[in-house]
Amino acid sequence: MSKTISGRDALEEIDRSIALLRRRLSDAVTEEEVQERRQTEVRDEQLLAYKELADIRLQYLDENGVEDLDRVHREALALLGKHDKSVADQQQAIDAAQDHLKHLEDKRVEVNTSLANTVEAYETLVAEVEAALSKDPIYQELVQNFDDAESVAHRAREKLSVARDERDEKGEPYEQDPLFMYLWKRGFRTTEYEGGGLFKMLDGWVAKLCKYDDARANYQRLNDIPAWLEQHLKDKEVDVAVAREALEAAEQKALDDAGTEDARKKISTLRTELEQLDKAIEQSEDAHRSTIATYHSLIAGEKGPIQDARTVLAEGLKKFAFEDLRELAAETVTKRDDDLVDNLVALRTEELDLDVSAERRRSKPLQLQEDLSEFEVLRRKFKAAQMDSHYAQLRSHTFNEALADLMQGLSGADAVFSRLRRNMKRRKPKAGYGFGGSRRQATLGLPEILGDIGREIAREVEREMIRGGGGFGGYSGGSRRGRRTSFPSASKKRKSRMPSSRKGRGGFKTGGGF
């Protein structure tokens, strides 16, 4: 049997993945800022090297040229200072946004844990009430009344299904007979018929040809029986509703007498707090995303003082060429100017390397931000569907594979959520599914089940029904079986036929019947 994890544990794993992506995003943005600043510093170091060369060989630059280099250097340093201040302020904003998010997420874990503990205590008390109530003869009678009403309604559904099948199957020969259908649609032999005189005589002749009178009685019966059974089923469903109401009223009184209302109120309060926290987390995620985008734009040099500094330095360096500087350096007897030129060559090489890697390092935070957004969307959907409930269960390998696909970009958040939801199971509550009715179901906050899991629950209901002593429903050993307060039987989706031994025993004269 494959291992499973609860919805709460699955949510914690999603939380850890989000925290990991936030750290990676923060590291990538920091790396980008370091490299982008280094790119500007390289140009400034180039400018300083040129300035020193000019001091060595004044004949290469006049005094105005040297003063221009000083001015460019000071202006670039001032702009870099402004950039550093902006970066520091924006980094503080990011840190504050992350701290606020973590505070909200930690608070949600705390509230969700309290909710799970309260629900567990509530369910323990409900199970005790159910066990005690199941021994009460009056309650047992209510259970039997409900099961009997449901059993009758179930048989009525099966009969209606058979009648509709009979109607479709055995009505086809009549509907393919053009003479019969001509008279049927005109209402021949009924009060709705409007023909007279010659038309009535001709229609009577047609009726003899197609043996209309006998066929009409059979076809009418084929149509009347499903209509009658449909009304019969509606009446039986009213009986079921009345029996269910009486049964659930008795259960609710027992639950109220046992003091479950205080737990229900606390559960409701905690759920409201969770909803408010989820809204706050969503708003905080949006704020964090916006802050990161502003920071990325700032350090990438798309706007702000660092772009101005690069422009100033680029303009100041335009007048220099490496070839001329090497020739000038070769004419001197000192080695300092040669070292300066070699340093300029190294700086130029580093600048080219930074230019080559610029696109990669600028795209990395954007990709990580996209991955983070996908995980945040998954988490929102996961919580909104109440799949973080302790009663939700997922196969470990299915969950891990789905999360890995999302992390690697092989599937989007919507596809992963649908995949997880289809494969989710419910952990069986301590008390019976139907005990306490819809009010208890709402208190538990059970996640909705889909696909194969829904059929599995239906099959479990039927298995319990059989263990309970046959029939739909039944009472055995003091516990109600097959109660369908929230879980419809699989038989509703299945076309049923009456046993073949009952065929031909009256009913339709066309050969079939009940």
Image: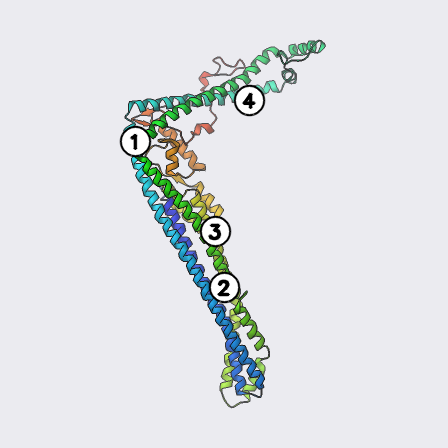
Q: Is residue 63 above or below residue 246?
A: below
Q: Which residue is mark 4?
A: 168
Real-space Cα distance between discs 2 and 1?
Answer: 65 Å
- 2 or 1: mark nearer the eye: 1
In this view, the residue in front, 325 or 284, is 284
Q: What amino acid is labelled 3 in the image?
A: Glu
Reading the chain from its start, which is encountered first: label 1 or label 4? 4
- 4 or 3: mark nearer the eye: 3
Q: What amino acid is labelled 1 in the image?
A: Asp
Q: Position of residue 115 (x, y in %)?
A: 35, 43
Q: Is residue 474 above or below residue 212?
A: below
The answer to whether mark 2 and mark 3 are in CB contact below 8 A is no
Q: Residue at x 58, y 81 (%)?
A: 323
The answer to whether mark 2 and mark 1 are in CB contact below 8 A is no
Real-space Cα distance between discs 1 and 4?
Answer: 53 Å
Q: Position of residue 273 (x, y in %)?
A: 39, 45
- 1 or 4: mark nearer the eye: 1
Disc number placed over residue 374 in the picture, else none: 3
Reading the chain from its start, which is encountered first: label 2 or label 1? 1
- The furthest residue to the right: 198
- 2 or 4: mark nearer the eye: 2
Q: Which residue is mark 1?
A: 257
SS class, disc 3: helix
Real-space Cα distance between discs 2 and 4?
Answer: 68 Å
Please give left or right for residue 120 compared with residue 64 in the image.
Answer: left
Q: Position of residue 316 (x, y in %)?
A: 57, 77
Look at the image and name its color scheme: rainbow
Q: Residues within 10 Å of mark 2 (few under 14, many from 20)?
A: some
